Each structure stands twice: as C-alpha cells, then as structure tokens.
Image: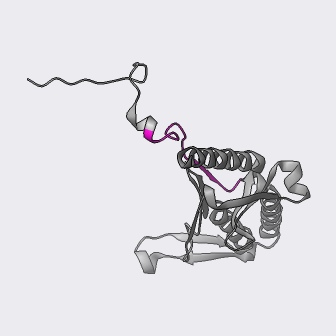
Amino acid sequence: MTSQTTHSKYDSKPNHESVRDPFLHLEDIVFYRSIVADIPFILTIAVIFYFAADLTEAIPHSVQRLDIKEATGIEMILQLPLFYFPPGIMLAFLIHRRLDDKYVIGKGFVRAIHGLLSLEKKDIQIQFIDIRGVEIDRGIYGRISNTGTLLIGTAMLGKEEMQLRKIYNPSYYRDTILARREMVLEHLQQHND
C-alpha cells in the first residue's frame, strides 16, 4: 500500500517550486489592438455605408442580379449592391487589422506577434533584462481616448525594436513591463551577490 501526501498552499511547508521560481504567481497578460483606437475609422465606415444605402436606393440599377442556377443547380438569384463593396472592404480591413496583432507580457519577456491573419508573420520576443526603455507614442485622439503605441527599445539597436500598436491604456502596460523588469533585475542581483 502506498501513501500519498499532498500539500495545499496553506500548509506550513514551503512549496519548492515557488522557491525556485519567485515569479510563479505572475500570469501572462495577453492583449490585442484596441477597438477604441479605431473609432474614427469605424465612424467613417458607417458614414460610407449610409451613403452607399442612399445611392443604392437612388440608382436601383446598381444592384447586380446573379442567377446561380447554372453553377449550383439551385434556382436562386443573388442580388449584389455594388455601392456596398467599398465600405464592405473597409470593414474587412478593420476586422483584419484588429485581429492581426497579439501582444503578451510574460514572466520574463514581452512578445509581439504581427501577422496572425496575414501571409507574413513576425514574432518578436524581448527579455526584460534586455529592455532599456519603454515609451508611449500617441496623438491628440490617443490622448482623448487613452490609446497609443508602446515603443520598446533595447541596447542592441539603440532605437525601438518592438511596437505594441494602438493599445488601450498604454500607461498600464508600460508600468507593468517596467515593474516586472525591476523584479527580474532584483532577482538577478540577489543571485549574483
């Protein structure tokens, strides 16, 4: 007969994993481009959709009718309003741009993945010990909506190496990165002493 002992986090014995990894309690922060940053573009699409509807009503011959019976065998006519194509393409572009980037702040790194829905994919990861500066870039709308781009620089190139584009509340993410960087540097300092 074998006996099993389990320890909960409330036991008096130390958890050996937490002794080895002082950052065990930290979770990865995963975030994407903010929809708030794209509100002007969304409003532009809405206005163009309004004018497309108005033009489609004024020019009914702009609606193309396609008989798909020959291709599918189903007796059906598709109606394609041509004036809806430009705002439809803009909407598809907005959705693509919104979901194309993914950002992760991990226990010891920052990672930016660009091109999740594109033909080309760029995956950049920078360790906290290599980070030399974190800046926020935002314009007038970014200041109003609390959105902006984080520019993360390392000593390797002397300029920003990573951009976390159009994120909501960039100050929070900058402060999180800098706080975790400090924790890593303190931990390394303790182990070197």
Residue at x 83%, y 61% (from the top left corner): 47
Most foreground residue, 107 or 62: 107
Residue 125, quarter of picture: bottom right
Q: Is residue 46 magenta?
A: no
Which one is in front, 18 or 122? 18
In the picture shown, does residue 87 fall above or below 40? Answer: below
- Residue 123 image point, x, y percent: 56, 68
Where does residue 95 sit, x and y in percent of width and height? 65, 62
Q: Farthest front residue?
A: 193
State the image quarter where residue 157 is shown: bottom right
Q: Which residue lies furthest to the right in this view?
A: 140
Residue at point 66%, 65% (across, down): 97
Considering the image in quadrants, where does the N terminus appear? top left
**In this rendering, does residue 165 appear at all?**
no
Measuring from the top left, give residue 139's x and y in whole percent. Answer: 88, 60
Q: In the displayed image of the protein, which residue is found farthest to the bottom?
A: 70
**Left or right placement of residue 117 versus residue 7 in this view:** right
Q: Does residue 85 lie above or below 110 as drawn?
A: below
Q: Which residue is drawn at 44% across and 79% down?
A: 71
Answer whether residue 126 is visible to the viewer in this image: yes
Expressed as whole percent of the image width and height from the top left, the position of residue 138 reads 84, 58
**Along the viewing direction, whichever of 16 and 35 lies nearer the viewer:** 16
Question: What's drawn in magenta, residue-wise?
Answer: 20-34
Residue at image point 21% right, 25% down: 4
Q: Does residue 172 appear left or right of residue 146 in this picture?
A: left
Instruction: Name above or below for residue 80 compared with residue 146.
Output: below
Q: From the image, give the main secondary structure of the stretch colored magenta.
A: loop
